[in-house]
Amino acid sequence: MNEDLTNDLPDGIRKLSLKQISDSRGSLMEIYRAEWFADAPFALQWNVNFNKSGTFRGFHVHWAHDDFLCAISGKLHLGLQDMRPWSPTYEMAVLTTLNAEKPELIHIPPGIGHGFWYDQEAIHIYGVSEYWNPHDELACRWDDKDIKVPWPFTEPAMLSEKDQKAGTYEQMKTSLLSQLMPPTST
């Protein structure tokens, strides 16, 4: 199995190093195996995201679906903040980088807020455990005072209209918690 790089990340986040097999023709890299995430839902839909330098995507959270992310060209800076009050890492906020030169796959479960910043052109692929649903796309302003992620910029160069008009972190959290249920103990 690939090396697990989960240290210092919110509870439930898994980050795995990926291995490439190379020869004179090029290389092959497995980016996802269901067995790597036996305790997570299977990714049903895969998407490719092309990003220009200076782009910021987020800050978003999902109540229904898990995300599986991998940079395949360039790098992305991924801000994460645990929004689940029952989690042992509640409110923990970190910045981690996914770099195509050192390939990794990260799993983000529901209830972890996240945003992506690109300091260079990059391509990332991501799988989701549920088909796209606009009701599961909760957003707030990236610069809300309640987001504790140490962003490596002062103002993103490019931001979608949706993200520019997003509400507050508190509004997003209220919407999230009205849908997200804590895990039950057995």
Image: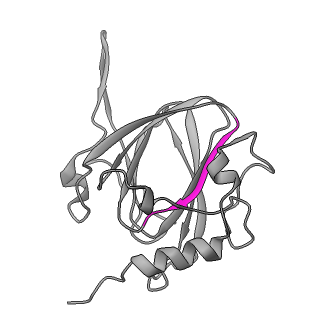
Q: Is residue 58 above or below residue 182?
A: above
Please give the name of the residue rendered at 51% of the width and 75% of the height, measured from the top-left corner: 175
Q: Which residue lies furthest to the top in this view?
A: 24
Q: Is residue 55 magenta?
A: yes
**Was residue 145 drawn as part of the magenta stretch in this picture?**
no
> What's drawn in magenta, residue-wise?
54-62
| Percent x, y of residue 52 | 63, 30
Q: Position of residue 78 (x, y in %)?
A: 56, 51
Name the residue rendered at 81%, 51% in the picture. Answer: 154
180 over 101 or under it: above or below: below
Residue 119: quadrant of the picture: top right
Left or right of 24 on screen, residue 82: right
Residue sitting farthest toward the right: 154
- Judge by depth and name the residue closer to the eye, 4 or 151: 151
For the residue pair 86 and 180, the one nearer the viewer reads as 180
From the viewer's perspective, is residue 14 above or below residue 48?
below
The quadrant the C terminus occupies is bottom left
Question: What colour-coding does the image apply?
Answer: one colour
Question: What is the x, y in percent for residue 168?
Answer: 67, 70
Q: Residue at x 45, y 70 (%)?
A: 111
- In which quadrant of the rendered view does residue 135 lie? bottom left
User: Can residue 9 be seen in the rendering of this structure?
Assistant: no
Position of 134 relative to 9 (above/below): above
Regarding residue 41, the answer to whether it shows in the image is yes
> Which image quarter: residue 79?
bottom right
> From this viewpoint, which residue is outermost toward the bottom?
186
Task: Report whether 93 appears left or right of 54.
Answer: left
